[in-house]
Amino acid sequence: MTTAPDAPAADVVADDHRLAAWLAEAAGRRLLEVRSEGLEGKALKDAGDRAAHVLLTELLATYRPEDAVLSEEALENAADKDARLRAERVWIIDPLDGTREFSEPPRDDWAVHVALWQDGALVAGAVAQPALGETFSTGTPPVVPGLGSDAHRPGQPPRIAVSRTRPPAFVQALAAELGAELVPMGSAGVKMMSVVRDLADAYVHAGGQYEWDSAAPVAVARAAGLFTSRVDGSELVYNQADVYLPDLVVCRPELAERILAFIAAHGTD
Ligand SMILES: Nc1ncnc2c1ncn2[C@@H]1O[C@H](COP(=O)(O)O)[C@@H](OP(=O)(O)O)[C@H]1O
Ligand SMILES: [Mg+2]
């Protein structure tokens, strides 16, 4: 049994930031329902991916019928791609990021990503962590503790969030250089939100990822005042013909220079 979400209030529908958060929360509730149905392993992963994708595409068709959608779970054909590349507004969604962790209750390191790209830039985004009961969004940008202060966690090692199942080797070398410790967790969105939540100071990744893995969390991280870029320091750009976007740095601004300098000197291989 699934419960259809109540219609959003008119002021939510009128505001892209608030609609993004409402959509991420609605998909999050649906995912918690799916998780309570007794499925396990691959069946649970597939059911979660599907249910959240179907709900989000239905809700976007209802509340933003003019906009294009780029979703991890949709098989994009040439006509869809053409429409998306010509569109002024594209919702870039990952209905379930951290599918592996979603299938391992009671883990809470999985997320729903909803971002809006408009005329070349990310303009709104929300990341829901349903099992944590938290949603981070550009509508009310999160306040990162101690941002810009030199006295943040004095004497403590910086913390770098990494994949719990496939940490890139170069991040271990980077951590050694910075005297940092690694904090393993699932989901790209959760890792970026861990920097927002001051559970980590940086998330550095290379070796593979797609636009939907980072669009919404990068929008939120930027709104919160964090540094975001590719590993070569160039800007992260979205709604490209090729949606492969394999690397990124999201960190407290005071760490950016040292992280980028290390990568420029040593690479990510
Ligand atoms: N090398 C790689 N190639 C492709 N996708 C990758 C990747 N490393 C991480 N990702 C994607 O980034 C998300 C977080 O992964 P991780 O927890 O290992 O850091 C996952 O999204 P999904 O769960 O939506 O598939 C995963 O698919
Ligand atoms: Mg993902």
Image (tube, rainbow, N blue to C red):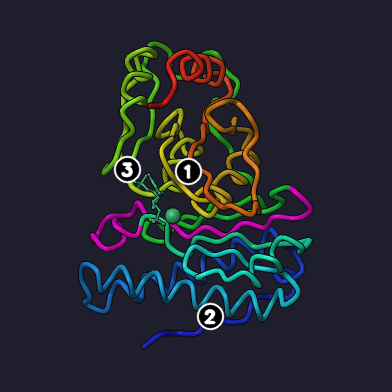
Asked if 132 appears above or below 45 in the picture, the reply is above
Gap in angstroms between the C-alphas marked 2 and 3: 30 Å
Q: Can you give x and y, in whole percent of width and height, for residue 87 in the image?
A: 76, 64
Q: Report which residue position mark 2 lands on.
A: 5
Task: Choose the circle earlier in sequence order: 3 or 1.
Answer: 3
Foreground residue, 151 or 227?
227
Q: Name the residue: 59% across, 30% down.
A: 227
Distance CA(mark 3)–CA(mark 1): 11 Å
Q: Amino acid at mark 3?
A: Met
Q: What type is the residue that disc 1 sits on?
A: Met
Q: Is residue 6 left or right of residue 43?
A: right
Looking at the image, is 264 positioned above or below residue 160? above
Query: Which label's residue is closer to the chain start, 2 or 3?
Result: 2
Residue 247 x %, y % = 49, 37
Task: Examine the rendered structure and indicate whether residue 201 appears above or below residue 12.
Answer: above
Closer to the chain start, of discs 2 and 1, is 2
Would you say residue 104 sits in the magenta stretch? yes
Cβ at disc 1 under 8 Å from ligand 1? no
User: Which part of the image, by quadrant, shows the C terminus?
Assistant: top left
Q: Secondary structure at mark 1?
A: helix
Q: Is mark 3 within 8 Å of ligand 1?
A: yes
Q: Which mark is residue 193?
A: 1
At 48% from the left and 41% from the top, the residue drawn is 246
Q: Given the image, on which type of amino acid does mark 2 rest?
A: Pro
The residue range painted magenta reads: 99-120
